[in-house]
Amino acid sequence: MHSTPKSSASKPNSEPEHSESPLLRAKLDKLRQLKALQAEAQRRESERLRGIDVFGMLGYTPTPKQKIFHDSTEFDVLFGGSAGGGKTVSLITEGIRACVRHPGIRVGAFRRTYGELKESLLAELSNFGFAGALGASWNGTEYELRFPNGSLLMFRYAESVKDASRRQGGQYQLLIFDERTLTPPDVCSFLESRLRSGRSDIPVLGIRSGTNPGGPGHGAVKMRYIKPTNYGQNVIQDERGRSVRFISSKLSDNPHVNPEYAADLQALPEKLRAAFLDGDWDTFAGMMFCYDDKTELLTASGWKPVSDVQVGELVATLSPTGEMTFQAATRVWQFPYVGDMRIHEGRALDFSVTPGHRMYARRYRSDAPFGHVAIEDLHSSSEHLRTAQHWSGDQSSTITIRVPGDPVLPEPAQEGCCTICAKPVTIPRRGMCEPCYRSWRRAGAPQDMEAFRDLRCNPNARYAHRPAYTFEKGDWCELLGWYLSEGFTTTASKRSRYGGRIYGFGIAQVEAVNGAKVARIKALLDRMGLSCSYDGHRFRVASRTLGLHFAQYGRHLDKFIPRELLNSSREHLQRLFDALIDGDGCRHREGSDASVYVTVSPQLADDVQELCIRLGRVAAISTVSPKNPDHHLIYRVSVYKSDHDRSVLRRDQIRTEPYSGVVSCVTVEPHHTVLVRRSGKAMWSGNSEISRDRHVIDPIALPASWKRYNGIDWGFSAPWAVLWAAVDEDGRVWVYRELYQRGVGEAEQARQILAAETSSEQVSVRFADDAMWATRGDAKAIAAVYADNGVHLTAAGKGAGSRVTGWQRVRSYLAEAPACPHHRAQGWETCPKIHIFSTVTELYRELSDLPHATKGDPEDADTTADDHISDALRYLLTNLGVGPEFLIVDKPPSQAEAPMQALGASMAYRPAEPAPDDAAWWLDDDDGPRPGGTVQVE
């Protein structure tokens, strides 16, 4: 009889059938003891590492504000504010300390480009000797700092999501962002998703950022760190439960800053000074109207994509009188956008902008001045400027040409390299390679090694003693035009000891074909005192100074016009232009000044187009593909006739297309105009947003005859907001009072509205949020409670699409129009269609901070931002009709006919003929005339 084995499942507490043998049990115990010993060793090593004075070994002494940053234990910390607060050095030392304290950690340090990395984080790292005192080794090829304990500090760039996606498979335990606002928010978000750890013994430390106000990510940074923490007063928890902290940094917090740097910041324009010196986060904000990613702006350094322009960079702008100047960009934006764009791609004009964007235009065949008009409000046919009407430029009559100097010298030599030429050396002689050592001996063994290094590595330095040339500036401009079109540098024969060395320049021109041009060039060189030879095909001038100077302007594929000459006067620029056209261009026909310039250098094509704009000419760039695929792409600059300074656009030629990508914009004050280019076609465009110096005025007396209106947005836990506005005879809106409170019941709200008004003040209509008519069981609607307390409301009429329509109306009122008497008296030619009293602070704050929606309709405002009193304004303006209309007469009335003291009845200059029937219909007073006089509103 066979017995059946008993199932171990019937005895849950019994030992398994195959129990551990004593030998196996001993091995397991030994393994547990070993793990315990390793854990204890790791704990002791961690304590030892934490005891290392990393900052002391680096020679770094934190300021009190930097110490607060280093002592922060929150997951996400922003150290920001004014320039010069020591943010970059704090970030790099924080990263080094993390690598020392946490063996095996991976730290990612990011800037937008490698160029920016070199100028900031890597420059600071170099000041600390690449952490050599801590045993770190630097890999200059991979841009990585490796520590003996296996930690790694990696320096990377991330200008776009595509760049950031290269890090998709990687992981970091600490992320460092230097100048975070310059990096698009979606790039930062993607990189934050790489914060993770695959080992239990390596902690995830979080995020450390440093930045100044301004830049593409300004709005996102302000919404994440600045406003929620009450400008650094509180530590908050984000939606993922991670602690977030903002530490304000100012120039005064850094005792080591150079006094000259502080003086430079003091000299900045007001808005830039507020941002960079005071760390004012409210300077760079506002309602944004942007360009697509194919649009370029003209800056003082040439054409640039809008997304590349930075705060403080000089951008071309046009005054109302047509004068082209360059002013600093005071605001910049860049953000992802998914929605409709307003697009026109014609032969003369080409643009792609977000809805509501301000164009710089006027009605076709109108004598009115050009002004800002929302793209939806353009006339059926409108004129758009494409060039500068006036350009002054540098009026100096002479120019001095010297041997160019200060080229980029080799990087300072590292260990194992020659201290002069920085090349690797096997057997150094006094730290130099053999050729440099022999050269040093031939030079008499000079003690000043820096001077010798400059002489050895800078081929131009040996010619610096040569005398300079001084020419009449117009002659020099003409000579440069011939050189860029037909010129070349002459070099010594390669078979000689000076083989390849530049000794002069030449200009090609065949006498048998172009005898008149040859005579002009010969006369020019004689006039400039330059001896030349001519063989029937080429002029040659033996001047090493001029040869080296012209060599700076590139060869045929990369020639360019120097910026200093583009800033010359129109008279000098005209001579440059004529020489360029006669060299590599052609004129259309006799009697016409239309012409074409052809080049294989894209930079020269850009410069010729800019040259034409400064001369008051319209130019467009197109490309021609060569028939031979081995030849280079040809750039064709078409120069229009001189009287074609504007183009006509029909509104039905503007189409709407969906767009998904990045949009960018800048603000250039005080004129809010910029020169934009798309597909090689340039035009003047506008920026329109809330601006304190134009939209906000001190309280003044408003005539009692002007109709008054309310805009009301309901709220209890969220703010309740009320606006009072008066509408003048031209339809301008003057916002003169506000209420903005939380936790106020509906009956008390009504009583406060009546209490705020004067006895002589009569409000015609009170437009309110439709939600105030909603019923809540047996309770009265809020609108009914208002009525019981003497405040009768009119529904604002919220419906499908009303939010977007309302914001478009707000944008229309923010735009410029012919100046009112108040601003005409101050010398203004235009002023906004809405004026906000300086006492109405909450409305200005909300409008200046209100961002675009990131979800839903991108033409809407972000409903998660503060938009309560802005909604009240939207209700009010949407119900005022079609908006202001201004009819202008040729001759304005005299000052006596338009007294300013009482802001008389006629606000804009009007002709004697009656206005159209539908103009300003909302000004008709059904209730009879108002009492005369004015009401002083505080």
Image: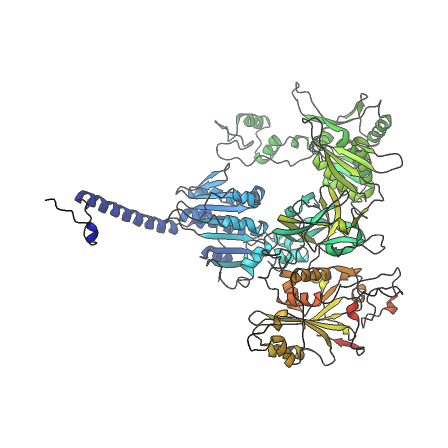
As displayed, is residue 705 above or below residue 249? below
Q: Residue 440 in the image: x percent, y percent?
A: 57, 28
The front one of 496 and 465 is: 496
Relative to 248, is 546 above or below? above
Where is residue 179? Give x, y as percent.
56, 50
Please, is residue 764 above or below residue 201 in the view? Answer: below
Left or right for 171, reference 500: left
What is the quadrant of residue 609 in the picture? top right
Residue 188 in view: yes
- Position of 283 with respect to 387 (left or right) is left
Does 193 sit left or right of 511 as displayed?
left
Task: Place residue 513 in its image quadrant.
Answer: top right
Q: Point out residue 558 in the picture as x, y percentages from the top left corner.
A: 69, 33
Q: Residue at x 82, y 55 (%)?
A: 369
Instruction: Locate the N terminus and report the quarter of the image it occupies.
Output: top left
Residue 179 visible somewhere in the drawing:
no
Viewer-proximal residue among 938 and 355: 355
